[in-house]
Amino acid sequence: MTSTLNRRNFLRTTAAMGLAAGFAPAMALAEDGTLGITLVLPSPLGDVGWGRALANGLEPVKAAYGDKVKVTILENIMEGPDADRIMTKTVADGSKFLIAGSFGYQNGALQIARRNADVSVLHASGFMVAPNFTPFAARNYEGTYLLGMAAAALSKSGKLGVVSAFAIPELITSINAFTLGAQAINPAAEVAVVWVNSWFDPAKEQESAKALIAQGCDVIFSNAQDTPSVVDVCEKSGVYVCNLNSSMKAYSATKYLGCAATDWSPFFLEQVKAHFDGTFKGHNAFLGMAEKVEKVVDWSADIPADVMEKIKAREAGITSGEAPVFAGPIAKQDGSEGVAAGAAMKDEEIVAMDWHVKGVTTPLPN
């Protein structure tokens, strides 16, 4: 069973029914042994994007547990005091499993975990850990490296573009890996970036894609957009496009390159089971191809066969751990050493990455 509410509807319900009664049905179910699971999202829940990937990850949970779980999705919840208040209310009303689906929810969700030892909390993209509080993130860079290889093979100009949400390490690593993958096929490949500073701004995303195309970029990577705006512009412009999180192939009949997709279901199933078993333990979950969370889907048939062979070989190496993405030598954007030859970045260095690799032509914003 799933219910979906947005901020306006949620607050309207709260005002009409009062704090204690706002989620009375969920609380009754919880008393009967049903686990209330609440997913909170920063953007509207559409058919593609980050929010959709998280919501899809809960479908196998519902299938596995049936009436033992009640899933509520709260969409378009702005980071800040509103989110803290809404998340607090869902827990007060009976939800014992909270998925805080944005980096900006971290502080509020952590305080909820500290005040409610019987609540299990998963937090997307964060770094704080508590006994009942687990940050989780995907190794998106593993997939975007492979997309970069394909992008360079199909690019005629050697100029690739990225429309990206925020300049946070998670998205910086995706861009850097995309660039390194492209350079594995074309060492002279360059990558330009436009930062839209939003998780959901279709108009700005479209403008950014058009600007990159006007600069001569002939393959565009949509890095964490929750709408198919960039994909749509590229399809209409005859430019290859790829994206993050969930497939947008339905919006690009001829120019879709592929998607670095995230399947959260193995992780969500594992964590919900741990909650039921009483074994939930906070830890830092950084998940990739080895855990079957990260994968590239919907590869374009236009990618040359010899390049696909190289992509598959590198994919196998990434999955096994024998060929990590951020293995040296890697130069930084300014030419200085980023990773020494024979070395590889550790996880704690990857999740804090705040520099671009050489080949990314756009400076990071201050």
Image (spheres, grey):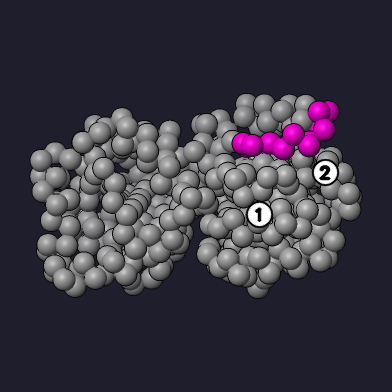
Taking 300 as reference, is 72 left or right? left
Q: Which residue is mark 2?
A: 154
**Can the viewer see residue 177?**
no
Which residues are the magenta region?
Answer: 296-307
Note whether residue 46 is visible.
Answer: yes
- Secondary structure, mark 2, is helix
User: Label 1, label 2: how many angstroms apart (C-alpha)?
Assistant: 16 Å
Answer with left or right where residue 250 lies relative to residue 50. Answer: right
Closer to the chain start, of discs 1 and 2, is 2
Say if the magenta span includes residue 138.
Answer: no
Q: Is residue 166 left or right of residue 365?
A: left
Q: Position of residue 286 (x, y in %)?
A: 50, 42
Q: Residue at x 87, y 51 (%)?
A: 158
Is residue 36 or residue 134 the one in the foreground?
36
**Number of labelled discs?**
2
Picture quarter with the N terminus: top left
Instruction: Identify the secondary structure beneath mark 1.
Output: helix
Reading the image, the residue beneath label 1 is: 231
Residue 298 vs residue 98, the one in the foreground = 298
Pinpoint residue 294: horizontal percent, then vertical percent: 56, 38
Residue 329 falls in which quadrant of the image? top right
Give the quadrant of residue 354: bottom right
The mark lying in front, picked from 1 and 2, is: 1
